[in-house]
Image: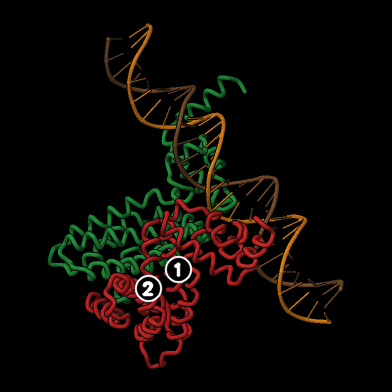
Chain colours: A red, B green, C orange, D brown
Amino acid sequence: MSAAVIAMIGRMTRWGPDAKGRLVQSALELYAKRGYDQTTVAEIAERAGLTERTFFRHFADKKEVLFAGSNNLRDLLVTAVAGSPSSAAPIEAVAAGLLAAGVVFNEERRAHSRRRQSIIAANAELRERELIKMASLASAIADTLRRRGVPDPAARLTAEAGIAVFRVAFDRWVDADNEVGWSDLVRGSLAELKVLVA
Amino acid sequence: MSAAVIAMIGRMTRWGPDAKGRLVQSALELYAKRGYDQTTVAEIAERAGLTERTFFRHFADKKEVLFAGSNNLRDLLVTAVAGSPSSAAPIEAVAAGLLAAGVVFNEERRAHSRRRQSIIAANAELRERELIKMASLASAIADTLRRRGVPDPAARLTAEAGIAVFRVAFDRWVDADNEVGWSDLVRGSLAELKVLVA
DNA sequence: TATATTGATGTCAGCGACTGACATTGGGGC
DNA sequence: GCCCCAATGTCAGTCGCTGACATCAATATA
C-alpha cells in the first residue's frame, strides 16, 4: 500500500471525526452479525480504524459500548420529574418523567432499538448491564423525589414501581407495530399497575 | 514436607468433603478481607486446598460463588406463590411468597447476610449479578402467576412490584436491629407501595 | 484379592479482556 | 514556524476462563 493511501485511510480513521461514534457503530454491526461473544474488542477497533487500547479509553469495558446513550435518558427522566408541579403526587411526577423520555422513543429510533435489544437479549452479561442501568435510573429518580420532599421508603418504592412500568412499556414498544406510541403504552402500563396493587 | 504430611493435607483438602462449600467459605473470607477485585480465583482455590481449574468446575465464574444459595430462595418463593389459595389475588399470592421466604431471613443468618451484602455493595460487577438474580426471581414468580391463570402484563407487573417490595424489605432487614422481623418488614413495605401507587 | 470403572481433581497451554507506562502524532495557539 | 496538548498507538503484563488430557481415590466387579 502506498504512503498516500495509508495517509488517506489515516485521515478517515485514526484522526477522523467521532471516534467514539465509529466504535459504537462497529460494535453494533459486529455484535449483530457474529454475536457478542464471538466478537473481540480488537475486531471492533480495527473496523473503526482504531486500536483495542483506544476502545478502552472511550468505554470502560466491552459491554459499555452498547449503553453510550443511557446518560441522556437519565437526564431526560430526572429533568421531567424535577420539573413536575409540586402539587403532583410522587407517582404522577414519575409518570411525567416516563412520558418525557418518549422523546427518544420515536418511530425513527424504533428499528435501532429493536436491533440493540435483540443483541442484549441474546447475552446474559449484557442483560446484567442493562439491569444495572435500569437500577441506576431508579436511583436517580428516587434522589429526585427526595429532593422534592418525598421521604423514604416512599421515594424508593415509587421510583422502583416507575421503572417497572418503564420496562413493561419499553418491551411492548419494541415489539409493537409502528402505529403504537410510547405515551399510550406508558399510561396503559401505569393504569394496570394501579389496578393490580390496589 | 514429608510425604506423610502431604498425604494428610491431601486428605483434608483435595479429596476432602464439601469442596464447593470450602470454596464458598474461602471466597467470602478473601472478598471481605482484601476486596473482590484484589482477590484472584487462584487464591480462593488455594485457600480451599484446590486449584483454580476446580473452582471453575463448581462455579461458572468468580461472581457466582457468592450466589450459590439463590436457587433455594427461588424455590421457596415459587412454591409458596403456587400454593396460595386460588381465591387469593395475584398480589396476595406474591405477598405469601415473600413471607414464606422469611425462613432464610432469620436471626442466625442476619450477620452472614450483612457480611455478604457489604461485599456485594462494594463492587459494581457483583451488584449486576445480584440484579439479574432478582430479575430471575421476578421471572419465576411471573411464570408461576401465569400458571395460576393471571394474564400478562398483570403477571409480570405484579411480580416486578413484588420484587421491589422484596428489595426494600431486605435492605431494611439487613440494616435493622435484631428485634425487627422479616414478616413485619414485608407487610410494611407492601402496605406503603399500595398507598403510593393508589 | 485384584482389576476395571468412574467422578472429582490436577496440569498445561492458550485466548481474550483489561491496564499501566511510555512513545507518537496532528492540530491549535504563540 | 515552533510548541504544547489531547488523542492515539505500542508494548508488556495480569487475570478470568476454557479445552484437552492426565491422575487419583473410592467403588463396583470379577
Amino acid type of the residue tagged 2 in the rendering: Glu
Residue A160's disc number: 2
For mark 1, name the chain. Answer: A
Residue drawn at the location 29% of the way across and 60% of the way down: B139
Mark closest to the chain's N terminus, 2 or 1 = 1
- Quadrant of residue A155 within the rendered picture: bottom left
Name the amino acid type tagged 1. Answer: Lys
- Residue sitting nearer the eye, C4 or A37: A37
Local secondary structure at mark 2: helix
Q: Is residue B103 left or right of residue A126?
A: left
Q: Is residue D18 left or right of residue B195?
A: right
Which is more toward the observer, B128 or B33?
Answer: B128
Q: Quadrant of the C terminus of chain A?
A: bottom left
Q: Quadrant of residue B160?
A: bottom left
Question: Which numbered marker is on residue B69?
Answer: none
- x then y, percent, for residue C17: 53, 53
Which quadrant holds residue A125? bottom left
Residue B103, can we see it?
Answer: yes
Where residue B69 sits: x, y (%)?
37, 50
Q: Is residue B189 visible?
A: no
Q: Is residue D14 above or below residue A195?
A: above
Q: Which mark is residue A133?
A: 1
Q: Which residue is depicted at the point 46% across and 40% down?
A: B22
Question: In which quadrant of the rendered image does the N terminus of chain A lie?
Answer: bottom right
- Indicate the position of residue A86 as horizontal and vertical percent values: 41, 92
Residue shown at the point (23%, 67%) measured from the top left: B155
Mark 1 Cα-neighbour bin, 10 Å: few <14, some 14–19, many ≥20: some
Q: Nearer the viewer, residue A52 or B144?
A: A52
Q: Residue at x 59, y 51 (%)?
A: B38
- Spatial distance from mark 2 to mark 1, Cα to Cα? 13 Å
